[in-house]
Amino acid sequence: MISSQNVLSHEVIGLNILVSGAANPSHRGLSGRIIDETKNLLVIETCRGVKRIPKMHTTFQVMLPSRELVEIDGSVMVLAPEKRINLHEKKRIT
């Protein structure tokens, strides 16, 4: 089950998200649902269309299915999603 302790070892597509801090001021305050993820970007569907937000230099607040709000520094997510999930899974096991 996804929680604040293991969110980085899970898929984030489908979760609701808020950009709480960003190097680009126009990204701050954007919210919506994550519809795709690449190594360097989160693709968010907002009420004003689809936005591509860089992970680096951005802070996100993610709403987990348990209704728990988790703040994530985007720089720790700068990996291809499949590599990020496997990396954090290995760290959790050891």
Image: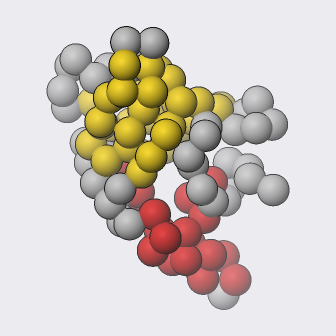
User: Relative to residue 75, is residue 31 drawn left or right?
Assistant: right
Question: How many numbered markers are drawn?
Answer: 0
Q: Is residue 84 above or below residue 75?
A: below
Q: Is residue 29 visible?
A: no
Taking the view exactly as shown, the residue that stands out farthest to the top is: 48
Q: Is residue 86 above or below residue 32?
A: below
Indicate the position of residue 33 as horizontal and vertical percent values. 53, 30
The colour scheme used here is secondary structure
Residue at the image position 59 percent from the left and 30 percent from the top: 16
User: Relative to residue 19, is residue 11 drawn left or right?
Assistant: right
Rendered image quadrant of residue 59: top left
Q: Is residue 51 visible?
A: yes
Taking the view exactly as shown, the residue that stands out farthest to the bottom is: 94
Indicate the position of residue 93 as horizontal and vertical percent values. 70, 83
Q: Is residue 70 above or below residue 40?
A: above
Residue at the image position 42 percent from the left and 51 percent from the top: 37
User: Relative to residue 50, is residue 54 drawn left or right?
Assistant: left
Rendered image quadrant of residue 10: bottom right
Indicate the position of residue 17 as horizontal and vertical percent values. 52, 30
Picture quarter with the N terminus: bottom right
Residue at the image position 74 percent from the left and 53 percent from the top: 2
Taking the view exactly as shown, the residue that stands out farthest to the front is: 49
Residue at the image position 45 percent from the left and 12 percent from the top: 47
Near-viewer residue (53 or 8): 53
User: Relative to residue 66, is residue 4 drawn left or right?
Assistant: left
Picture quarter with the C terminus: bottom right
Indicate the position of residue 85 as horizontal and vertical percent values. 55, 69
